[in-house]
Amino acid sequence: MIIIGADMVPTKSNCDLFVNSKIEDLVGEELVKIFNIADFKIFNLELPLTDSDKHINKIGVCLKAPKTAIGAYKSLGVNFLTLANNHIMDYGPKGLLDTIDVLNAAGIAFAGVGHNINEMKSSYIFEHRGKKIGIYCCVEHEFSVATTTSIGANPYQKLKTYLEVKSLKEECDKIIVLYHGGKEHYRFPSIELQISCRELVDAGADLVICQHSHCIGCEEKYNNGTIVYGQGNFLFDDEDNEYWNSGLLIQIDDDFSISYIPIIKNKETVRLANEKDKQTILNAFYERSNSILIPNMIQKKYDEFADEMLFSYLYLLSGFRKKVIFRILNKLTKNRFGRWYLFKKYNKERLLVLQNFLECEAHRELLTKGIKNKIEKIDYS
């Protein structure tokens, strides 16, 4: 039996439990029993294990845990960790190199990172019940990805990724793809994400798991493969809401049949879901899975989500979040002032310009490179 969990992240609230290997406190007796009978255990390490204090410049929080937090992973018997995620480079090259050293010393296999894009350890192969199982790891483009000249995570690149999965399948009986992508707090795929995941199945993947959304999404059976659009967290004590409070372990049996084990966040720890919660979680999961079979449903859901999120994107782009008067007026009017002002500022002409810069490959590439060059020249000290 193979068990796959998503984000396993030491946080300030439970780091001592990780360091001191308090496994039963972290995951509970019932989950310990499940892990003890599993032949191979896979998780996502969503942060570097490092004692460095030098974080990178990025949008969003920078995560890390001390090297000694490896104790819990060893005690739980973790066999493999994907490092292809958007936080693995939060503390720069040193943070990643420290993590690699820690994992090597602990005897825990990993993939999804490399010294550059051409020297990439994108996959790992292991034997299970007489079969070769390949794990391929990639991440959507954020601040963590490797380039031709810099260390980092394995970026998803449509053709390159397809060919690498196809090549891996020639060596293996079964392929698992861990794809760190999708939109946070969104339970459905976009059309583009669905196309990408289906292409990975066409390349030879038997199971594709999207692990970035911090919420349970839905499942799609496509050709001879299974796609999971959102597994939820395994153990990540960052928020308490409907998205972060539940997750799924994925169980793969000897015949490669796939089943799901619901788990529940328990303050700073995680527990196996009780029977009532299990049924609630699975019923909602399969209801969403059935809904995406309805023609145009994925596009409809994504259109609604895009309309909901547009204000947030424009708000961040405008720079107004640092203007006190804007924040006060916005709070007093429950965002009505902000919406009126931003949609006046970003009129149709400006939105068309923005659309063109984001959609056109040449504009997007040039704009991104110019921004990166400018950031490198700014003194943040």
Image: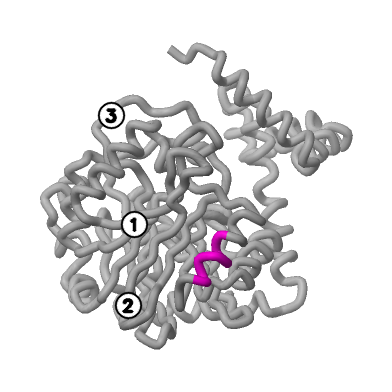
User: What is the quadrant of residue 340 in the picture?
Assistant: top right
272 relative to 56, above or below? below
Say which residue appears at 69% left-offset and 59% top-offset.
192
Q: Main secondary structure of the magenta part?
A: helix
In magenta stretch: residue 282 = no
Say which residue appears at 64% left-offset and 77% top-offset.
291
What amino acid is labelled 1 in the image?
A: Leu
Say which residue appears at 29% left-offset and 78% top-offset.
274
Say which residue appears at 40% left-offset and 31% top-offset.
92
What amino acid is labelled 3 in the image?
A: Ser
Q: Which quadrant holds the N terminus?
A: bottom left
Residue 204, image x, y percentages: 57, 72
Question: Residue 128 has which mark?
Answer: 2
User: What is the quadrant of residue 252 in the picture?
Assistant: bottom left
Q: Mark 3 points at which residue?
A: 52
User: What is the quadrant of residue 254 in the picture?
Assistant: bottom left
